[in-house]
Amino acid sequence: MSRDADTAAPAAPGLWPVDRLLLSTLAALGALAAACHPRPAPLLLAFGALALFLWSSASFGPRSRAGEALHSFAPLFVILGIYETVGFVVGAVNPVRWDGTFAALDARLFGPIIPAWRHALGRPSWLSDAASIAYVSYYVVPTAMGLALYLQRRRGDFDRLAFDLQLTLVASYAGYFLFPTAGPRVPVAQAATALGGGTVSEAVRLFIHTCELNDFDAFPSGHTAISLVFLADGWRMFPRWRVPLAATAASIVFSTVYLSHHYAVDLLGGALVAAGALAGAPYLRRALGFGARASTDPGPTEGRIAGARPRDTPGAS
């Protein structure tokens, strides 16, 4: 069978490592909710629905190209569902709040840097808008990277990126249980005056207030962790994207403190999570059965669309 035929073949049946990672996470969250939450039923239903969706996507995956696409991107929707519900479990499991400790650490470790950061250039409206765009690009950039890899049929790289990102987020959520922290958030009524910006900033604040339901997601900084992971993976997988990826990651990290979503120590925690996830992902991927679709994927340097230029492959200059 030719390489191109291999890359076009449907995925092997069964669960992939990222599926097993997320199903294990859902099971752990369900157990914690059942043991600690005063009203666990809605959470258990939500976790069960997410698990059923992921399991069903794995079942449909081998049947068609559409099924494989659903299976490939199902973890994205599942991790969003986990994020939106995990805060309710965190609040029930751990009553300790770390905001006072981390605010004091910021003052002790960074001193005048933090006020200067939050008032950079006098907080012009254009900078607040740019920082707001950077903050929500956290959702867009990794998704765009995964979509690009999928459309180029680079299934090996796609699987690695997906697993690295999901593992990083799961590790961040574990940190929420250990250090429940709201962050230096500005109340909604005061946000326009304190944070500034124009229509873009207002739209982003509305999005965050409406869609981000987790109140204990400051430490470690998932924005920092994910930015460093997509930069590290993208550096190898997308050589021509290195400069824009680095600029995007830096702008996301800048926005977290500038927009008062995180303490600076949250960023250090996020960097540690990213380093640990990148170091441990290859071993955990193998432990969870990495290679479930290796028989249909010729690998990161071969699994590309027919006729792609050599410099489009990972590691090319």
Image: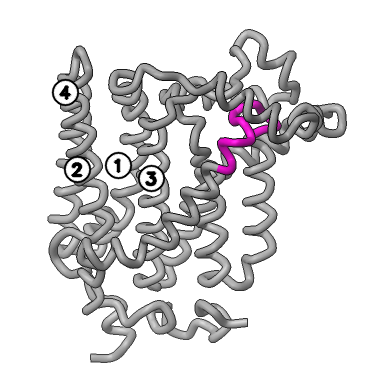
Say which label, 3 or 2, has the lower sequence index: 2
Q: Earlier in the sequence, mark 4 or mark 1?
A: 4
For marks 4 and 3 on the same chain, the one whose residue lies earlier in the sequence: 4
Q: Find numbered disc 1 in the image and state the secondary structure of the residue it sits on.
A: helix
- Tell me, for residue 35, which label it has, or none: 4
User: At 70% from the left edge and 16% from the top edge, which residue is drawn?
Assistant: 192
Q: Nearer the viewer, mark 4 or mark 1?
A: 4
Q: In which quarter of the image is the N terminus?
A: bottom left
Say the numbered circle drawn on residue 53: 2
Q: Left or right of 306: which side holds 242?
A: right
Crowding at mark 4 (Cα within 10 Å: few <14, some 14-19, many 20+): few
Front residue of 131/3: it is: 131
Which of 145 and 216 lies nearest the eye of the viewer?
216
Q: Which colour scheme is used?
A: one colour
Q: In this view, does 254 lie to the left or right of 38?
A: right
Which residue does the numbered mark 3 point to in the structure image? 171
Disc 2 secondary structure class: helix
User: For the residues marked 1 and 3, what is the alpha-carbon distance in whole angstroms?
Assistant: 15 Å
